[in-house]
Amino acid sequence: MTNNILLCFDSNYNTQAEVTIMSLLNNTFSKLSFFIIHSNPETTVGLSTRIKMHKNTEGLKVYKFKKRKGITFPNFDESHMTEATYYRLFLSDYLPDEINTIMYIDPDIVCINNCNFCRLFNTRFSKHSYVSI
């Protein structure tokens, strides 16, 4: 079973996303496949190369976010939210149908311990369940 990770961000978070992804890769014994929805994928070329070269990378796919006609994203004054905050709502427009499980991770987290992705991906959630990592 492949451990699929989704990140959604824009060019303002390229550096943070690289730290997130590399910290995940460096703190797991699992192979990870990354799916990125980005406003300007051309700015992720260096990041993509470093991810692909890592021994724990199973795959990487970067999608350019294309805003649907007639959709507007509210702008939250005095907040750090950007258009990229909404990208995850459209993941079905980008991800292949054969993906059964995927974990969304914000592009500004840092993994400092071994991530037991196998345990997380094998967890079945019910109405009142949660996973502590």
Image (cartoon, rainbow, N blue to C red):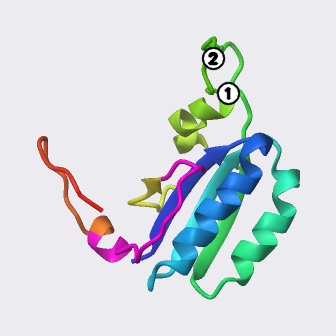
Q: Residue at x 61, y 65 (%)?
A: 21
- Magenta residue span: 105-119
- In this view of the protein, can residue 76 be seen by the observer? yes
Q: Residue at x 50, y 81 (%)?
A: 31
Front position in the image: 127 or 50: 50
Q: Are marks 1 and 2 in contact (CB under 8 Å)?
A: yes
Instruction: Give, as a three-letter code, the residue at label 2.
Output: Phe
Instruction: Give, as a three-letter code, the residue at label 1.
Output: Glu
Residue 97, percent from left and from top: 49, 55
Front position in the image: 58 or 49: 49
Q: Secondary structure at mark 2?
A: loop
Quadrant including the N terminus: bottom left
Residue 133, percent from left and from top: 30, 62
Q: Secondary structure at mark 1?
A: helix
Q: Is residue 47 magenta?
A: no
Q: Is residue 12 above or below residue 75?
A: below
- In this view of the protein, can residue 95 be seen by the observer? no
Q: Which residue is mark 2?
A: 73
Tell me the tag on residue 83: 1
Q: Quadrant of residue 54?
A: bottom right
Q: Is residue 110 magenta?
A: yes
Q: Residue at x 63, y 27 (%)?
A: 80
